[in-house]
Image: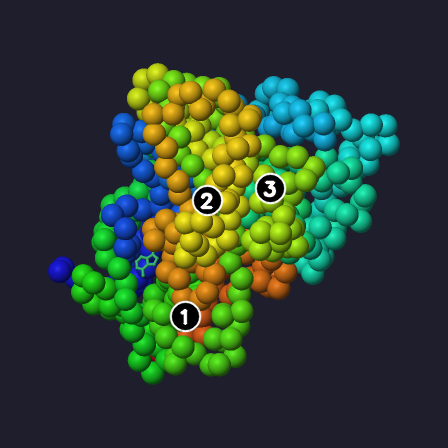
Amino acid sequence: MGKKSYDVIVIGAGMGGSSCAALLAKRGLKVLLVEKNDRAGGKALSLSKKGFAFTAWVVVAAPILDNKFEEVLREIGMEDRVNLISGVKSDSIYISPSGEYKRLPYMEPGALDPEIIFDWLELKGEERDTAMNILTEISIMPPEDIDKLNDISFDEWILSRNPPRPLYAFIVSLMCDLMFMTSVDAVVAAEAVFGLQNLFLKSGGLFCEGGYGALAEVYCDAVRENGSRVIMKAKTEKITIENGQVTGIVTDKGAFKAPVVISNAGIQPTVLKLVGEEHFSNSYTNYVKDLLPSNGMIGMRYYLDKKVIESGYGVIFSDDTPWNMERFIKAKNNTIPRKGVIFFEVPDMYDPKAAPEGKQIVMTGYWCPADPNMTKTEKKKWIDMGEETMLKAFPEIADHIESKEMYSSTQVSRLTRDQVLPGQGGECIGLGQVLGQCWKDKPSVKAPIQGLFYVGCDAGGTGVGTQQAVDSGIKVTNQVLRYHRMHAASP
Ligand SMILES: Cc1cc2nc3c(=O)[nH]c(=O)nc-3n(C[C@H](O)[C@H](O)[C@H](O)COP(=O)(O)OP(=O)(O)OC[C@H]3O[C@@H](n4cnc5c(N)ncnc54)[C@H](O)[C@@H]3O)c2cc1C
């Protein structure tokens, strides 16, 4: 099947793999990009069903200004091929201690007024001063001070400022519970403060017409149009190694050769399955096995016969919903209710082609374990909790459901990452952005095998999900290009 030898092979056309392959092809390398699915996008791929077209689950990107998606589009000269959408109306709902579902009054996107937020969160006197100090400190913290927060959790950092509980719940819901999908007492404070600063100063709520898969497809087009090659529906079964050097890959569509392989398949599946433990030292294998995934997301897609919700996305939370490790363990063990933050997205409110005329698709998302093998009973417990809260916030949904379907860590794993360790595979983000494996301690993008690199959320990037993956794509491109040139130049 055509040419079998390349400068670089990229395994996986997720946001990380497709952006990296696009940039490498644009910069002149002969690239082969192989993807097991029939479309690009990985954890942010697009689906089309019954006349609806959307990102497969709740995916809200940030920041809007200086985002990495456009940085790549500019370099490949394809800004006009995809429509990134900002300025979408959002809806934040605070369930007050008295049980009232309180909506944050409308503010122009990007023009958040702290006083309005403090009123909404029912903050009083001194609490408002404390809240303002915390928001200011996050907004103006210089990079060198953020860097110093590598070894403490965001929980330790924020609790030392005595935040009023509703403000704590609001910030943790947005940042740790949605953007990182990892417990607040495990998330690295540096990563959380950096993310919040970006959100405050560069705004959040960026979407893609046709779903985020459309963006990854454009990156794939850049590979093809720069003389390189993309093969869809080709699952890599093995990365081949000879004398400690990568030589290529074996897929279900044949074998291909390259001195450099970049894997977007996840560090754990790459090391433990595609390469094999026998090619690494025990200490590296143990290090890789010890890395922790982010949590998973479970939710519903509601196909409605009427437009019921008027905002494009939102969050529903209360003082009791922020997750920490203890609460999550207890929830998994059924000793407390599985009460957590709810996220929702309504793609037809920002993309007219997302739903047939007059209809609506509403997607919800909330935490669940990353384990793709969760039982039906387990899934139902997580789903029921979320559905109950969602229908209390938007009771009209119940009268207009034409059909509904659930998604969970099982589908996420099937479409993206193989399970190679217990409890792993259906993670929402990739590796968790937790202490000891993030910020300065993020795994190196270079594996201890000649010519083997990782790209995507597991290595090389910072930020929130999709941004982190593309940030990694950009950084890995630079490293691989240097590696390629140095080897070509050496005698
Ligand atoms: C339910 C859910 C909600 C999310 N919400 C948000 C959000 O609100 N905001 C946000 O920014 N991010 C969100 N994310 C996270 C974000 O989508 C991911 O972090 C990001 O897209 C990961 O990109 P990646 O390149 O690291 O890897 P992936 O997306 O996992 O891509 C890996 C690719 O490699 C392919 N692959 C794997 N193994 C092989 C193989 N053996 N052979 C060939 N191909 C292979 C896969 O099919 C996939 O296409 C969400 C994710 C999920 C699942």
Query: Outermost residue toward the left?
Result: 1
Residue 471 shows up from this direction: no
* Residue kind at label 1, given as amino acid type: Val
Q: CA distance from mark 1 to mark 2?
A: 33 Å
* Residue kind at label 2, given as amino acid type: Lys
* Residue kind at label 3, given as amino acid type: Lys
**Residue 145, position in %: x, y?**
73, 52
**Residue drawn where x is 51% and y is 49% of the image:** 368
Q: Which one is in front in this view, the residue at disc 1 or the one at disc 3?
A: 3
Is the residue marked 3 within 8 Å of ligand 1, measured from its CB? no
Q: Is residue 476 positioned above or below 244 on the image?
A: above
**Tag of residue 380:** 2
Check disc 3 and report the residue beneath it.
339
**Residue 199, position in %: x, y?**
60, 37
Q: Which one is in front in this view, the residue at disc 1 or the one at disc 2?
A: 2
Mark 1: which secondary structure?
Answer: helix
**Tag of residue 89:** none
Q: CA distance from mark 2 to mark 3?
A: 13 Å
**Residue drawn where x is 38% and y is 18% of the image:** 306
> Is residue 235 toward the left or the right of residue 272 in the image?
left
Looking at the image, tell me whether mark 1 or mark 3 is earlier in sequence order. Answer: 1
Foreground residue, 430 or 394?
394
Mark 2: which secondary structure?
Answer: helix
Check disc 1 and report the residue beneath it.
271
**Residue drawn where x is 25% and y is 48% of the image:** 38
User: Can you tell which quarter of the image residue 195 is in?
Assistant: top right
> Is residue 311 toward the left or the right of residue 13 in the image?
right
> Is residue 188 toward the left or the right of residue 375 in the image?
right
> Is residue 94 toward the left or the right of residue 401 in the image?
right
Looking at the image, tell me whether mark 2 or mark 3 is earlier in sequence order. Answer: 3
Q: CA distance from mark 1 to mark 3?
A: 36 Å
